[in-house]
Amino acid sequence: MPKMKTKSSAKKRFKMSATGKVITAQAGKRHGMIKRTKKFIRDARGTTTLSAPDAKIVKGYMPYDR
């Protein structure tokens, strides 16, 4: 059987944690930060884990990163 392909866009945007969860950057921080609250900016710092339905989709894009 030929190898399965990894989506290049997914490998640039997502990482897998040691427990198998999908780690990604926080959304909503590209522009328009002047109108966001200070609380939102604080809470959206760093990275977050994807929800289970979204993680299932992303894991299909990266078959060997388990």
Image: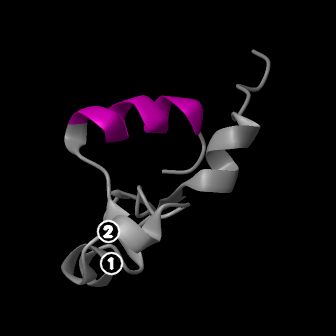
Q: Is residue 51 visible?
A: yes
| Residue bearing mark 1 | 41
Please state which of residues 30 and 47 is positioned toward the viewer in this rendering.
30
User: Which percent across, then down, holds residue 34?
Assistant: 42, 72
How was this image coloured? one colour
Instruction: Please identify the quadrant where the N terminus is shown.
Output: top right
- Part of the protein shown in magenta: 53-63
At a point 46% along the width and 37% down the height, the residue shown is: 58
Mark 2 vs mark 1, foreground winner is: 2
At a point 60% along the width and 43% down the height, the residue shown is: 64
| Residue bearing mark 2 | 36
> From the viewer's perspective, is 13 left or right of 52?
right
Is residue 41 shown in magenta? no
User: Which percent across, then down, holds residue 36?
Assistant: 32, 68
SS assignment at label 1: helix
Q: Residue furthest top?
A: 1
Please state which of residues 30 and 36 is positioned toward the viewer in this rendering.
36
> From the viewer's perspective, is 24 left or right of 54?
right
Q: Are marks 2 and 1 in contact (CB under 8 Å)?
A: yes
Position above or below: 33 against 31:
below
